[in-house]
Image: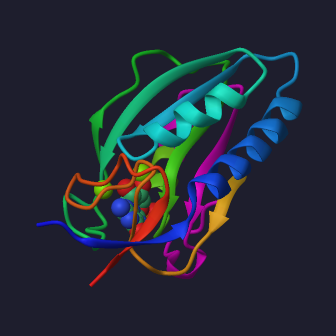
Amino acid sequence: MVEKIGTLITEEEVAKRIEEMAKEISEEYKGRTLHLICVLKGGVVFMCDLAKKISVPVTMDFMAVSSYGDEKVSSGIVKIVKDLDDAIEGKDVIIVEDIIDSGRTLSYLIQILKERKPNTIKLCTLLDKPETRVVDVAVDYVGFEIPDKFVVGYGLDYAQKYRNLPYVGIIEQ
Ligand code: 5GP
Ligand code: MG
Ligand code: MG
């Protein structure tokens, strides 16, 4: 089945915002090496584009957690599917996410990663749905605040499809 998808945020708007975020991050981490942690799979497109615009040295690692399965509604269960390859002790870490919805995934992740004693740890997300927050999480860098709609594209999937869309779209029922 192929869903009908409307545009919420255009490719140009995303690119412009990522450049702004990268500039802000580059200034804040001047003189340091930044360790980006991508939350797979949704965060991968955003992290690659963000990393390319950051001017300080960047190292990368990847982690996979599952909270939704292929459904559109949160199960509330967060599970580590793939852990990091490298230790983060003493590193300046930014966790890069596609979207924060209930906040469950990030609040769990930040908790377990803080125990590994990074020098600093911050959160960066392309999209934020503040209306649907269940767990309070402090997000340091937000690309766009969006309404409570199920979005796809730019890394975000519906049943694993549409991660490759170069814009953020909404599935029209
Ligand atoms: P949270 O734990 O904050 O509720 O949800 C985080 C994860 O749920 C996101 O990283 C993302 O994978 C998925 N998610 C939440 N809202 C959406 C959405 O609107 N579209 C898609 N494709 N995934 C979403
Ligand atoms: Mg995600
Ligand atoms: Mg998903």
Quadrant, the C terminus: bottom left
**At x 59% / y 52%, what residue is drawn?**
125
Residue in front for this viewpoint, 149 or 19: 19
Quadrant, the N terminus: bottom left
Q: Tell which residue pokes out farthest to the bottom in this image.
A: 173
Quick check: 73 above or below 163?
Answer: below
Whether residue 139 is visible, yes or no, is: no
Whether residue 83 is visible, yes or no, is: yes
Quick check: 68 above or below 155?
Answer: below
**At x 53% / y 75%, what residue is drawn?**
133
Query: Residue 89: horizontal and vertical position, in percent?
Result: 60, 19
Query: Residue 56: horizontal and vertical position, in percent?
Result: 77, 19
Residue in front for this viewpoint, 123 or 118: 123
Count of numbered circles on the image: 0
Query: Residue 151: horizontal and vertical position, in percent?
Result: 41, 68
**At x 47% / y 68%, what residue is drawn?**
101
Query: Residue 27: horizontal and vertical position, in percent?
Result: 88, 32
Quarter holding residue 94:
top right
| Residue range (magenta) | 110-138
Q: Tell which residue pokes out farthest to the left in this image.
A: 1
Tell whether 116 sits left or right of 173: right
Tell whether 97 sits left or right of 92: left
The chosen color scheme is rainbow
Q: Quadrant of ligand 3?
A: bottom left
**At x 54% / y 27%, what residue is drawn?**
116
Residue 132 is one of the magenta-drawn residues: yes
Tell whether 173 sits left or right of 5: left
Residue 139 is one of the magenta-drawn residues: no
